[in-house]
Image: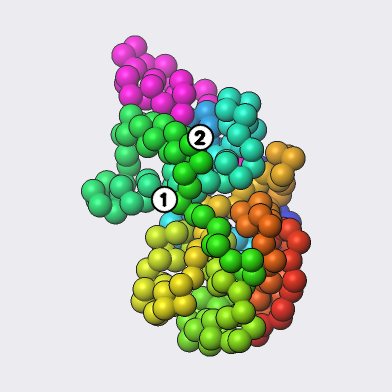
């Protein structure tokens, strides 16, 4: 069953986002605008029932629009890190816009404007997530502890974790969801940074499609000495790092 679900997820992601549609005599200009440009840079949207992470053990509440890295690379010659930031920042801005306006469905023109704005930021090297100015990084995989927030605080207080800059990583939660938890449970007193679900991708460093969402942590944290604290160590968190089991 697990293999079947993975296959469904994979083919849903790679499905062509420009499937044939009925031609209207008078097409909506906004639809034409996005269909001829921005829409080509995204994978097909995941329906809510399949928007889950089997290895992280969760159903995502916030929708994430994942980008087609192959199309973006061909158009902009972006590297893996730039595409991760593009995807992350676009989703974050879209979520913030929805939250502030109460709009669920954004007009295509508005989505395109946000895309172009984020593209310009990434091109200029301005990212929402910036590596801390510390050599040692304590990466805490949050997903196994989502039902035990007090346990997270105890982990953050441990001397082993305190020896590096703490970063929480989650394949289940969006940036806005993580920020809410950090404030709710006072994790911000440890100065944590966040790596969220919008920073994962089905594309690897060679821009090849994979069957599961993954992330290369060395690309996000170049030149850092990284220790991952977790009850288990999923292969989807890729890179070179030390592992410390934390129950």
Residue 238 visible within the image: yes
Q: In which quarter of the image is residue 232?
A: bottom right
- What residue span does the magenta drawing correspond to? 12-38
| 157 in relation to 18, above or below | below
Labelled disc at residue 1 = none
Instruction: Reply above or below: 26 against 2.
Output: above
> Observer-nearest residue: 162 or 88?
162
Q: Where is residue 54 in the image (x, y as percent from the top left)?
A: 64, 63
Q: In this view, does 131 lie to the left or right of 233?
A: left
> Is 29 on the left or on the right of 153, as rendered?
left
> Residue 206: horizontal and vertical position, in percent?
74, 40
Dot 1: element: helix
| Contact flag, marks 1 and 2 (Cβ < 8 Å) | no
Determine whether 99 is above or below 153 in the image: above
Q: Is mark 2 on a helix, strand or loop?
A: helix
The N terminus: image quadrant: bottom right
The tag earlier along the polypeptide, 1 or 2, is 1
Q: In which quarter of the image is residue 203?
A: top right
Q: Mark 2 points at which residue?
A: 123
Distance (Cα) linking label 1 and label 2: 17 Å
Residue 245 magenta-highlighted: no
Q: How crowded is mark 1: few (under 14 residues within 10 Å), some or many (20 or more)?
A: some
Front residue of this view, candidates 190 and 231: 190
Q: Which residue is drawn at 61% across and 86% down?
A: 159
Q: Which mark is residue 92?
A: 1
Please name whichever residue, 54 or 163, is drawn nearer the observer in this view of the structure. Answer: 163
Residue at the image point whose x is 40% and y is 66% from the top: 179
Residue 141, image x, y percentages: 60, 71
Circle 2 packing at 10 Å, graded few (<14), some (14-19), many (20+), is few
């Amino acid at each position: 069953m697990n293999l079947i679900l993975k296959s469904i997820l994979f083919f849903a992601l790679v499905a062509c986002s420009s499937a044939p549609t009925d031609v209207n005599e008078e097409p909506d200009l906004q639809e034409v605008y996005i269909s001829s440009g921005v829409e080509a840079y995204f994978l097909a949207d995941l329906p809510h029932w399949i928007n889950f992470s089997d290895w992280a053990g969760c159903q995502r509440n916030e929708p994430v629009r994942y980008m087609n890295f192959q199309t973006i690379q061909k158009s902009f010659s972006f590297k893996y890190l730039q595409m991760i930031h593009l995807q992350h920042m676009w989703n974050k801005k879209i979520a913030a816009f929805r939250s502030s306006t109460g709009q669920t469905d954004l007009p295509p023109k508005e989505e395109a404007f946000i895309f172009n704005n984020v593209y310009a930021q990434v091109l200029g090297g301005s990212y929402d997530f910036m590596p801390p100015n510390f050599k040692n990084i304590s990466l805490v995989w949050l997903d196994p502890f989502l039902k035990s927030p007090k346990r997270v605080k105890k982990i953050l207080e441990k001397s082993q974790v305190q020896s590096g800059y703490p970063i929480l990583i989650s394949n289940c939660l969006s940036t806005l969801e993580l920020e809410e938890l950090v404030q709710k449970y006072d994790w911000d007193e440890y100065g944590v940074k966040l790596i969220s679900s919008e920073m994962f991708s089905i594309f690897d460093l060679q821009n090849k499609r994979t069957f599961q969402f993954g992330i290369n942590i060395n690309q996000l944290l170049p030149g850092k000495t990284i220790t991952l604290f977790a009850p288990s160590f999923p292969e989807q968190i890729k890179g070179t790092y030390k592992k410390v089991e934390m129950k």
